[in-house]
Amino acid sequence: MNITFIGAGAIGTLWATQLVQAGHRVQVITRAGTEVCRQLVLDSHTVTVPANQPQAITDCDLLMVCTKAYDVMPALQPLIEQLHPDTIIVLMHNGMGPHAQIKTLVSPSQPLLLATTSHGVFSPSQGSYQHTGHGETYIGAANQAGQQCAFVAEVLDHALSPVYWHEAILHQLWHKLAVNCVINPLTAIHQVNNGALLSADYQDTIQLLCQELARVMQADGLATHAEQLKTQALTVARATANNYSSMNRDCYHGRKTELEQITGYLLARAAHHQIKVPTHQALYDAVKQREVQKG
Ligand code: KPL
């Protein structure tokens, strides 16, 4: 397949290199948009792919959008007009929200898929990545045209297994969001690694966060409860104990965070259902304050 990536950060590099190895023709569109090829470095192996070629958008079968959540809309909007009507768009990013905006941009006949992955990728230096944790990937349809595209799960599975087609992908994304709502702001504010959240000091806060999350998720139609969410968050914290969350790193380096698409999405859904989420609101305010100070 002709596969074009928008965004060649950690997750983009992981998937792009695996898809090259599986025999696909991969290209990238980079933020600067100037280079004509890009070296993708994963686990000390370098793969060179074409970059920013004029036909990268018009001729691709699959468009993988792996940018930061806040960049999805600005990156995709100027390219939508050039896309072939059959090109399948896959959004694979942290957080939730951008798909609702993208759905209003694309024609209903353009297949739109959402994916979430739990692979761990660490960046020891700018532009170089290590695949530190083998995870799993879920993908599913965000519109009716996307429902015909379950074969994409097989294409991705062949490159980096396991990949599962999920009929209710928004539910899967909500569960990933819940984990991020617990781990990311806490590790960012306290500047600790994910494993630190296993200590007794954090358990009361995590309990409150999960109770608030469960109320909002239930109101959004998910059958879940606080204990399940707490187990999921602590399982991820244990599995990624030595890692620093993406929000921790963004705060550390003084970069913009994905707060709006993580806790911000939860706050918006809570407001919609008129549910109070004071513990999440306090974390949101604390990260926001850090961003403003650093910015
Ligand atoms: O997705 C993550 C992130 O850092 O954004 C987790 C799962 C918390 C792993 O660090």
Image (tube, grey):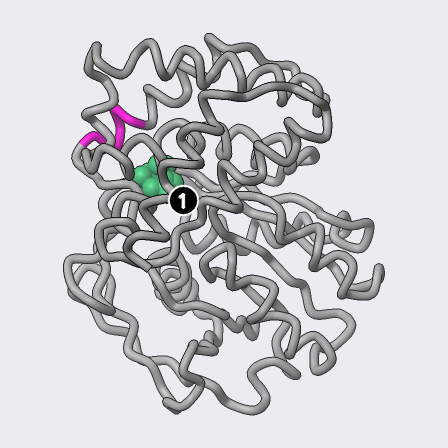
> Is residue 13 left or right of 141 when viewed as pictured?
left
Residue 239 within the segment the image draws in magenta: yes
Residue 81 at x, y = what percent? 74, 80
Give ligand 1's quarter of the image: top left
Q: Which residue is mark 1?
A: 288
Quarter of the figure that contains the C terminus: bottom left
> Is residue 112 left or right of 214 when viewed as pictured?
right
Q: Residue at x 33, y 21 (%)?
A: 235
User: Local crowd at mark 1 within 10 Å, few (<14), some, or many (≥20)?
Assistant: some
Residue 67 within the segment the image draws in magenta: no
Which element is circle 1 on? Answer: helix
Q: Main secondary structure of the magenta part?
A: helix
Q: Residue at x 65, y 44 (%)?
A: 140
Check mark 1 vs ligand 1: CB closer than 8 Å? yes or no. no
The vertical placement of 225 against 82, above or below, is: above
The quarter of the picture where residue 266 lies is: top right
Q: Is residue 119 in view?
A: no
Residue 256 at x, y = what percent? 38, 57
- The residue nearer to you, when weighing 269 against 170, is 269
Q: Is residue 78 in view?
A: yes
Q: Residue at x 77, y 50 (%)?
A: 143
Quarter of the figure that contains the N terminus: bottom right
The vertical placement of 273 against 93, above or below, is: above
Residue 97 at x, y = what percent? 62, 47
Q: How many marks?
A: 1
Q: Which residues are magenta?
A: 237-241
Residue 280 at x, y = what percent? 47, 26
The quarter of the picture where residue 8 lies is: bottom left
Q: Residue at x 36, y 53 (%)?
A: 292
